[in-house]
Image (cartoon, rainbow, N blue to C red):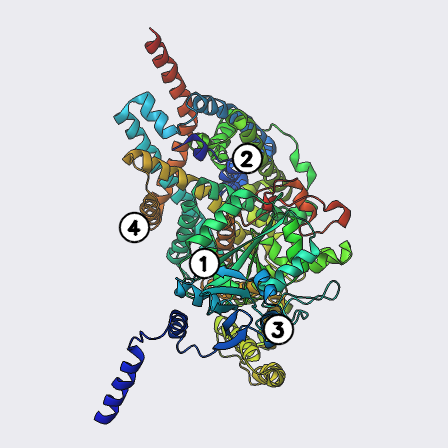
Amino acid sequence: MKFKLVRTTKVDQLIKKPNNTKNQAEQTIETLKKNTRNIDDVLFKKIPTDEGIVTVIYSSSLVEKMTLQSMVFIPLANHINQIHQVAEVIDPSDLKDVTAKLDSGQTLLYFHQTNTILTIDTYSAPTRAITSTMTESTVIGPQDAFSESLETNISLVRRRIQNPKLKNEDQTIGTEANIRISIMYMDDTVNKESLDTLKKRINKIDYPSFTDISVLKQLIEDNPLSPFPQYYMSVRPDSISRYLIDGRIVIFMDNSQAAVVCPTSFFEMFISVEDYYNRWTTASLLRMLRFFGFFLTIMITPMYISALTFHPEILPYELLLNLQESRSKVPFPPLFEVLFIELIIEVLREAGSRMPAKVGQTIGIVGGIVIGTAAVEAGLISNILVVLVATSALLSFLPPIFLMSNTSRFIRYFFILSAGLFGLFGQMLAFAWLITHLEGLKSLGTPYLAPFIPRKASDLLDSIIRFPTALLKSKTGISKSQKK
Amino acid sequence: MSTNKQKFLNRYHVIFLVQSAMVGTGILTLPQKLSSVGYSQTLFPILFGVIASLTLLPMIWMNSKYPNENLFRINEILLGKWLGKGVNLFIVLQFLVFSSGIISSYMHLIQSTALPEQTITAPAFFFILLLVYIVRGGIRSVARFCIMTFFITIPMLYFLLWAIEKGEMSHFLPFFNYNGKEFYDAMKKGYLSILGYELIMFYFPNIIDQKKAYKHALIGIWISIVLCLITTAVSVMYFSEWQLKYVEFSVLNLFKAGEFSFIERIDIIGMTLWVFLILSTVTAYLWCAKRGMDSLLSKERKNYIYILALIVFLIIKMPFSQEFQEKLFSASSYVGYVILVWPIFLAIVHLLRKKQVQT
């Protein structure tokens, strides 16, 4: 033990000992190496060139070998002038800043003779190819989706809107992780006030790191306590472009697939971009289904509780008989029966989404058929309730925005409990709460319940009923755009 | 407070604030209250509408003289600080008791039909929680709630379809079959149902377009009047004169006429949905009471609403006999009439004082 201690101190001394005999160039290299100690993917390579020895420093995890070869090594060996054309000169005195550049994928060239440092942007971290979306798929319309690279995502939007008015402002957030984000908007239509509010909110954020844009979204929402998502999130470039043209603001984040659109409204959570590709009749039908589906999914099972617990007289005699017959063996009161089966559905859903895909399907069948039928036959639940719960579970997946379908599932429990307390009266109280909560919500300063508030007549053309495309030219009221 | 920040009620807010504050529990019992004139009650709502339009005039006139002050402040300005505050205290108490009366009668109705195995304590508690939640958002939140209420509850008119089908048109005639005493009795009891438009005196300073406020309030009043007219007309068609007199919640009994193959008792759905109408009425009153509290204590605090809500809850749960409660609530309803004529009195004071200042 003692022996080891002595040995380490000796080594330490050797490293720390200032070596005055080394010249300036070697000293600089030494400092750089010290700054990047224990970052083992930073490589130093000494290369003899026409202008003396050059040390090439780069981070091997962020720079691809091919890029390095074509941008640095080949020019260094053959045409060193090319390097001077593309490279940028930086101040060698501040070496701390120099290492930060390595982290962003730049390559440093240190010229020993002249004691200068040049940097070349060689960032070429591996990215995913553009694939179709798994989460927001449509039958008609473009199939490409955003990937996790900021540049790719912006290029996918710029391809769709070829207009110099389309601006994107880059910014770095996250006090520790330094994540790049980009705020995109149409300069001539966007509401400048909303843009300022958004920027102010982003600048105020004090948060160490962002692993997905949904983290940022929660930090800049108007009411962080509400169960409702207040900004729209999508991975579809066509949907994002539509909103940009309408005058909304879009935020992209590096390493995050989705983009955030703000402001948005409650109603827009039920709009799929496919509605604009379908014929207007089909689109209207589907929209009505999604919108009223939301209210049905939070009301169906509570209705069952209310009707059976408090107001059996509300049902006609035959139906009541039918219901009572089906739950004649059930030992629980309706409230527990509903909670029991709703929780089983939640468990199935959660298990299905956490399990490896191949096992997941089997579990779905086991859960759905085996538990469902067995529970009914065992007399734990009534089969009519199974139908109701399954319907409401399916209905909850209708909104194209997944966050909204999560919300509807959460709110349903609230309604179930109120129905268990006071029956229909409790449900109406909960509904009144929902209405009040929704009308108090705001998305980037504009009311969440648009197009009811603020009213704009032309918005009604693109609401529950989507009118023929030729009529949908004007900007929506919620974007408060400069153009009409 | 800058004037811009203070003015945020647009015309739809005004229309539906006036309209929703008028339609509450009153309309449920309107046909019974008017039953002293029997089948001739059909046209009474129109008469009420005319009276309401006329009594609205001095209110708006009085407010337009002080465009940035509500009635509580006007009282203090015209009657002096202490007398004004005394009157204000009285108004606040009146509003509290009046709202408690509305809530209490609705809760008893709910309890007797929908929740027979519970006391009214828990439902009333949650109701008041929701009330506080809405009022905390300010008058704009109340106004928006009123708008939503209107559109959510208006489909209930459809439930009247069966009653109209089963009704008898000939009941309408004769129109004017009553004597003076019956007429007075019907007026006294029935007019209570349409109280609520007087609250405009309290949120008038928040209206953007004050010049057109009278017009918008009139639209609101007449929407309510039409609803009352439909109620009385259908009741007259459907019920016998004896039923009109003794069926207390005639509207609910109208709903009972409905028949679906999958729902038996529409009246329970209608009655629970009615909670929206009660909420929209009571929130408006409670908000005004809260403003009164602000002016009484010369401070604006959001927390006052909790105190007021607690008082309302205690009034509902007060340990007195049913008769006393009913007496109190009906007394407070009649005091509501005083508030209707109060602006006329204020207008006289205003004119007198103006002369004093001039001479």
How many numbered marks does the figure carry?
A: 4
Find out whether the residues at labels 4 and 1 contact each other: C-beta distance under 8 Å. Answer: no
Q: Which residue is mark 2?
A: B15
Residue at image coords 30%, 48%: B320
Quarter of the image with the C terminus of chain A is top right
**Tag 3 subunit:** A
For the N terminus of chain A, give its image quadrant.
bottom left
On residue A219, the disc is 1
Name the residue furthest left: A2
Marks 3 and 2, how far apart at CA: 78 Å
- Residue B319 numbered tag: 4
Task: Measure the C-alpha gap from mark 2 to mark 1.
Answer: 38 Å
Rendering coords of residue B203 (x, y %): 44, 33
| Residue pointed to by mark 3 | A74
Q: Identify the image quadrant of residue A224.
A: bottom left
Q: Do residues under tags 2 and 1 come within 8 Å of each other at their CB atoms?
A: no
The Cα–Cα distance between marks 3 and 1, rounded to whole angstroms, is 47 Å
Q: Is residue B147 visible?
A: yes
Q: CA distance from mark 4 to mark 1?
A: 49 Å
Above or below residue A17? Residue A94 is above
Would you call the spot at circle 2 few (<14 residues within 10 Å), some (14-19), or many (20 or more)? many
Is label 3 on the same chain as label 4? no
What is the chain identity of the residue bearing mark 2?
Answer: B
Q: Nearer the viewer, mark 4 or mark 1?
A: 1
- Callout 3 secondary element: helix
Amino acid type indicated by mark 1: Leu
Q: Are marks 2 and 1 on the same chain?
A: no
Q: CA distance from mark 2 to mark 4?
A: 39 Å
Q: What residue do we see at 66% from left, 56% from top? A: A158
| Dot 2 or dot 4, earlier in sequence | 2
Q: Is A39 on the left-hand or right-hand side of A301?
A: left
